Image (cartoon, rainbow, N blue to C red):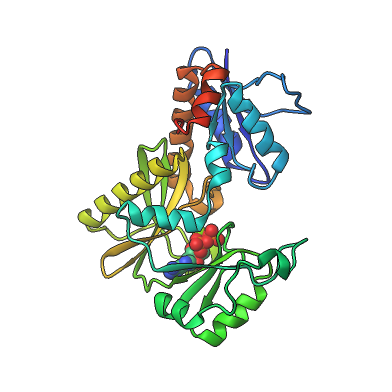
Amino acid sequence: MKKIGVLFGMESTFPPALVERINGADVPGITAEAVRIGHIALDTPSDYDVIIDRISHDITFYRAWLKHAALEGACVINNPFWWSADDKFFNYDLARRLGVAVPPTVILPHKEHPAGTTDRSMRNLQYPLNWQEVFDTVGFPSFLKPILGGGWKNVYKVESPAEFFTAYDQSGDLAMCLQRGVNFDLYFRCYVVGQEKVRVMQYDPRQPHHLRYVQKPAPLDPALLARVEGDCLKLCRALGYDLNTVEFAVENGVPYAIDFMNPAPDADLHSVGQANFDWIVGAVADLAIRKAQQGRMPAEIRAVKFLNGELG
Ligand SMILES: Nc1ncnc2c1ncn2[C@@H]1O[C@H](COP(=O)(O)OP(=O)(O)O)[C@@H](O)[C@H]1O
Ligand SMILES: [Mg+2]
């Protein structure tokens, strides 16, 4: 019997729906359950052929176990190695090289020394920074946001150098980037599953949380839609994510990719709505079943491939 495990944190709707959908599909030889693990030894085999990871970004122990499970030949959605290596600045840089539109973006040194470091740890840093050049590159309004983060935490919209410095002062020891604000008239969040399926959802970030996913969206220009779908696939294939949401802000018909580091994307019924929920549950269930049917890769081969950077 091939086993699919779902690893999750506080969310309550998506994980059980996924387990139910996979088991309800009645595919011979495939079963799904909520993951159960305790301590792990170096030679503990993985009980799971496929693991859908919704929480290892918050729980280091889980991330370590998932890397071990990958060595055991399990398929982890999303690949914990990619996820561990990723950051938003790298994302934007990669996007630009792939021909995806991104706003001008600058990464900045931490405002405060990271814990356990002093100014002696950062003697390579130019001081003071050339702030005028930063502001000329990015412009205003702009967004100051962490390169590692999510859920709008520590994201500041700033309209002037004075507002920027106030926000930067509050950013502590986080690594932040400053990005030109897109003056958008349309905004999309797109589910991308298995580096193949895309669901473009109109989203209004200016609304309160429960109203953000537009339930009766206006029809979209087919050329814009095609570009957005193409950009989603390009980005997720290059980043190696099997499950992601890619966010675009559209200004003058150009979709700017502004957040595509969401490897455990919001999939809560109460925020995305029934139709989006049904779609994402179905798409991830199908993907997990397909990956389980492909079978495990022998651990030795996977390890060597990982080290050679051949695995997606
Ligand atoms: N360059 C930008 N232009 C316009 N809005 C932005 C920009 N960057 C961020 N935002 C707004 O801030 C929100 C949070 O930023 P985002 O990059 O998505 O970070 P998080 O990972 O915290 O979701 C976005 O959903 C969007 O509404
Ligand atoms: Mg976001």
Q: Point out the image quarter for the C terminus.
A: top left
Task: Residue 99: name its quadrant.
Answer: bottom left
Residue 181 to residue 235: above or below: below
Where residue 65 sits in the image (x, y, percent)? 68, 32
Residue 79 to residue 47: above or below: below
Residue at image location 29% in from the left, 47% down from the top: 230
Is 158 or 215 nearer to us in this picture?
158
Q: Point out the image quarter for the N terminus.
A: top right
Residue at image location 48% in from the left, 50% down from the top: 273
The tally of labels here is 0
Residue at image location 32% in from the left, 56% down from the top: 100
Residue 264 visible in the picture: no
Where residue 21 sits in the image (x, y, percent)? 51, 29
Residue 118 to residue 237: above or below: below
Is 108 or 195 nearer to us in this picture?
108
Where residue 63 sits in the image (x, y, percent)? 66, 38
Residue 38 visible in the picture: yes
Where residue 210 sits in the image (x, y, percent)? 54, 60
Residue at image location 55% in from the left, 31% down from the top: 76
Residue 76 to residue 58: above or below: above
Task: Residue 181: name its quadrant.
Answer: bottom left
Task: Residue 257: name its quadrant.
Answer: bottom left
